[in-house]
Image (cartoon, grey):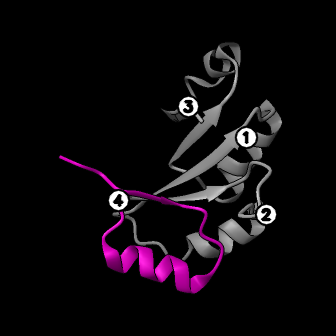
Amino acid sequence: MIKVKICGLSTKEAVYAAVEAGADYIGFVFAPSKRRVSFEKAHELAQLIPPTVKIVGVFVQPSLKELETAISVVPLDLIQIQTTFSLMLQMQDRVNFLIGNY
C-alpha cells in the first residue's frame, strides 16, 4: 500500500487541505528552510490533525535536546532526519524513524 507524506506545512489552511486530500503523514520542517516552523507553531497546527494522520518532524543534523524537545512539545509520532548513525542509535528506543537521503 502506498502512503503519502506532505511536508512543509505552516498554515491552518495547508493542514486542512492535506488532511482533506487524504495524507497519511503530515511533516513539519524544523531544519533550516524557508518552510521551517517553530515547535510552538507546529504544536498549534498539530491540534488540527486527526489521530489517523501521523505527525512527522523533519530535521537535518539535530541535537538530542532538539529532538527530545520537539517530540514532547509538538508532539511527534515519527521523525525524519539526516544525521549520524550514532545519534540514531541513541534515540532508537524513544522514537520511530523515517530515514531518507536529501
Callout in the foreground (2, 3): 3
* Residue 4 percent location from the top left of the image: 35, 56
Callout in the foreground (3, 1): 3
Q: Give the residue pinned by disc 3.
A: 101
Between discs 3 and 1, the one toward the N terminus: 1
Secondary structure at badge 1 equals helix
Secondary structure at badge 2 equals loop
Q: Give the residue pinned by disc 2.
A: 38
Q: Give the residue pinned by disc 4.
A: 24
Circle 4 residues within 10 Å: few <14, some 14–19, many ≥20? some
Q: What range is drawn magenta here?
A: 1-23
* Residue 60 percent location from the top left of the image: 72, 38
Disc 4 marks a residue whose amino acid type is: Asp
Are the residues flagged by discs 1 and 2 in contact, CB closer than 8 Å? no
How far is disc 3 from disc 4 in space, using C-alphas?
A: 20 Å
Residue 11 located within the stretch drawn in magenta = yes
Circle 2 residues within 10 Å: few <14, some 14–19, many ≥20? some
Q: Indicate the quadrant where residue 24 lies.
A: bottom left
Quadrant where the C terminus lies? top right
Along the line of sight, which residue is nearer the eye, 88 or 81? 81
Circle 3 residues within 10 Å: few <14, some 14–19, many ≥20? few
Q: Give the residue pinned by disc 1.
A: 68
Disc 2 marks a residue whose amino acid type is: Ser
